[in-house]
Amino acid sequence: MEVYLSLSCLVLIFMDCMSSRSFARAVMRAIRVTEFGGPEVLKVQNDVPIPQPKASEVLIKVSAAGVNPVDTYVRSGVYAAKPALPYTPGMDVAGVVQDVGADVKKFKKGDRVYSMRTSSGGYAEFTTVEEKYIGRLGDSITFEQGAGIGVPYYTAYRALFLRGETRPGQTVLVHGASGGVGTAAVQIAKSRGIRVLGTAGSPEGVEAVKKNGADLVFNHREEGYIQKIMDATGGEGPDVILEMLANVNLEKDLSMIKLHGRIVNIGSRGPAEINARATMAKECIITGVMLLISSDADWNEMHAAFEAGMSQGWLRPIVGKEFPLEKAAETHDLIINTKSAQGNIVLKL
């Protein structure tokens, strides 16, 4: 009997060890970038090791990953902070917690979550994320929608309130209001009693922004749209402008901004030339947004705002297009070269 029990114990121990080793050797599908360049450098690899969470990290089984313009800047090698090669792109994911590190307190296995920054990369079947970059995903939000919360909503919130200091009753102009950050900014601003003017680059985009709740929408490809915005504000201009393409629009923004107004630069694809005297005449402020330098207090504020937004029903991420992982290169081309964005672009895993 003792021999039998000993052998049984040995078998169990052996099986446990083999299970642990199998998990350690387990692999996943992921996009890998081995050199900086165009969209074509995004390659699917089927034997990438599943990352293991560090003490303060969470391992997420990814159901959907969001695609953002910043992903393309990193991939092309022009972003200020370059990852070591090879790497997996992607900051925004939504999925289910698979495992947690020893120091993680807020999440457990099985929780539905989303992220706005990853440690190991989001274009993958599994990813690791620092606990502070994770939010709880409400039951009414799909994983595809959840993949569009992170960078778009948190950037929009930071631009509106932490940098733009927009207040209820004021007017904000949201350039590119049909894109990921733009749609988020419209929803957030309207939930706080802010009047929203939006721009889009096509009739379809204009209709999408109207449907999303903006008070007035203008096609920025039409002649005279700036004067229409001025007329809509009684000739004073918006209190705050959220700028998605400063290298194209900043000079125009200075002609529109209200006296003592604030222009918040969210995106730029090159240098911008302005007449600095315009800032003197308006006594306006031009500031920028960099989401990833947010303080712990900022992260906590934004997490609380969006948890409330899900429960109250005003947070409604708009999924424009969905693609399989193999089409990652196509999504990078689309998000940069589209003439009029309409919602978030998502990779389904």
Image: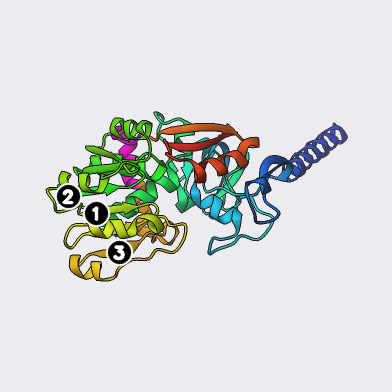
Q: Is residue 65 magenta?
A: no
Q: Are marks 3 and 2 in contact (CB under 8 Å)?
A: no
Q: Quadrant of the C terminus?
A: top right
Q: Secondary structure at mark 2?
A: loop
Q: Is residue 311 magenta?
A: yes
Q: Which mark is residue 286?
A: 3
Look at the magenta stretch and give its main secondary structure.
helix
CA gap between label 3 and label 2 equals: 17 Å
Q: Which residue is mark 1?
A: 240
Task: Please tell me how crowded label 2 is: few (under 14), some (14-19), or many (20+) other residues with Cα within 10 Å.
Answer: some
Q: Are marks 2 and 1 in contact (CB under 8 Å)?
A: yes
Residue 137 occupies which quadrant of the picture?
A: top left
Task: Please tell me how crowded label 3 is: few (under 14), some (14-19), or many (20+) other residues with Cα within 10 Å.
Answer: some
Question: In the rendering, at what x and y percent does residue 149 appear?
Answer: 42, 41
Q: Residue at x 49, y 37 (%)?
A: 345
| Highlighted magenta segment, given as a residue range | 304-316
Q: Secondary structure at mark 1?
A: strand
Q: Residue at x 64, y 49 (%)?
A: 52
Q: Nearer the viewer, mark 3 or mark 2?
A: 3
Question: In the rendering, at what x and y percent does residue 191 appear?
Answer: 24, 40
Q: Residue at x 43, y 39 (%)?
A: 341
Give the residue type at disc 2. Answer: Gln
- Which mark is first along the chain, 1 or 2? 2
Q: Is residue 335 above or below residue 75?
A: above
Along the line of sight, the residue nearer the viewer: 82 or 215: 215
Q: Which residue is mark 2?
A: 170
Q: Quadrant of the N terminus?
A: top right
Question: In the rendering, at what x and y percent does residue 217 appear?
Answer: 27, 38
Give the residue type at disc 3. Answer: Ile
Q: Secondary structure at mark 3?
A: strand
- Which mark is first along the chain, 1 or 3? 1
